[in-house]
Image (tube, rainbow, N blue to C red):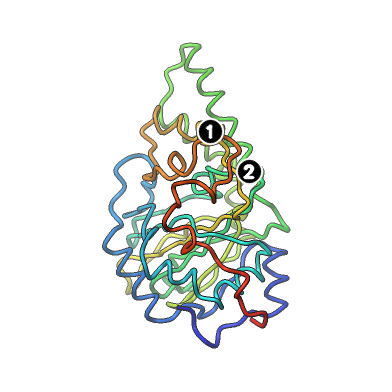
Amino acid sequence: MIKSDFSISEEDVQNFRDHGFLKLKKIFSDELVRHMKKLSTSEVTPPSDNYGLGFSKLKYDVGNDDPIILDLMGDSMFSAIMAKLTEQQLFFTQGLGFELEKNKSTGFPWHVGTQSFGFQRRHDAGYTIWTPLCDIVAEGQRGGMKYVSKQLLSGEFVYEHINLLPGYMKSEAESGRDLTYEDFSVLKNSLLNSPQMTSLLDHYAVEDSFEPGDALIFDKYVLHRSVQLGEGPISSRLAYALRFSSIDARYDKGRVEALAYPRIAFNYDAGSEFNDKVASQDGEQVYASPYFDGTREARTLDVADAPQNV
């Protein structure tokens, strides 16, 4: 699953805790990368609505119950590394596939995972491992991501901002204003993606190069955006992402309902019913939800059997 010689240093751990992200050099085996590529290639499709229009293809819930992806969660070394980095017991929630087309797709602008972690309370822990499935050359064709250290600016405030939008827009609609998706998009994105703010974030952002087998882990408060795939030998860039949540996370029904409003009003379907299905009662432990019956153990990163020296 992961390469036998992969390890992390105490400096890596401290950097992750300080900045919220860490490049994991050559963590995944060639076999796992090939499987991720096969899985993503077979499942990702062009976006069918306003969500994800910056991608040529995008799909949530890719490999959620795939046996090989679940085997990764049972890899004791992988569990040990995740536990050391996050100091949390985690479980795998869902997979996602993204494709950028050369010289065309723009991907997502600056954002945090308000949709992917929309089922849980704002302060509950959440993490992503993003794995590009081809070479990413930051000084060449590009096509990777940019991300900003939490020491400079944490994206936690974006979750608060997103929670304000539905109530405001409902009030505006009830007062007679004819709202469109563009109105929603401006309210949602302008906080981070005005020309001035984009320039500011780009100035401080990190953009790494990647080879197949490399990955990036980042927590849910790290501001990040896609980088367009430019001119070069690769016609499209495919990437696969794994989402993880703390087993202590609690269901936030209010946040789920808030996220549902633009989906209904503006054809803004994120392509996943995960947030609606994963639980139903406000405050219930997400990990204990019947949604995971049958796969709960396989999704759980077992810290009890994880080696201590990683």
- Report crowding for label 1: few under 14, some 14 to 19, many 20 or more residues within 10 A (C-alpha): some
Q: Position of residue 193 (x, y in %)?
A: 55, 45
> Disc 2 on helix, strand or loop?
loop
Position in image of residue 134 (x %, y %) = 38, 73
Kind of residue sitting beneath label 1: Leu
Tell me the amino acid under the disc marked 2.
Answer: Arg
Q: Going by the image, does 160 lie left or right of 116?
A: right
Give the left or right position of residue 62, taking residue 72 as reference: left
Q: Work out whether 297 lies above or below 107.
A: below
Instruction: Assess disc 2: are there few (<14), some (14-19) or many (≥20) residues with their C-alpha within 10 Å of its C-alpha.
Output: many
- Residue 122 is labelled as 2
Q: With respect to residue 234, does 95 lie above or below?
A: above
The single residue placed furthest to the top in the displayed view is 175
First-in-chain label (2 vs 1): 2
**On the image, numbered disc 1 is attached to which residue?**
187
From the image, state whether disc 2 or disc 1 is nearer to you.
2
Vertical comparison of 226 with 49: above or below = below
Q: Is 159 or 106 nearer to us in this picture?
A: 159
| Residue at x-position 57% and y-position 71% | 79
Determine the residue positioned at 63% across, 43% down: 122
Secondary element under disc 1, as helix, strand or loop, is: helix
For the residue pair 107 and 67, the one nearer the viewer reads as: 67
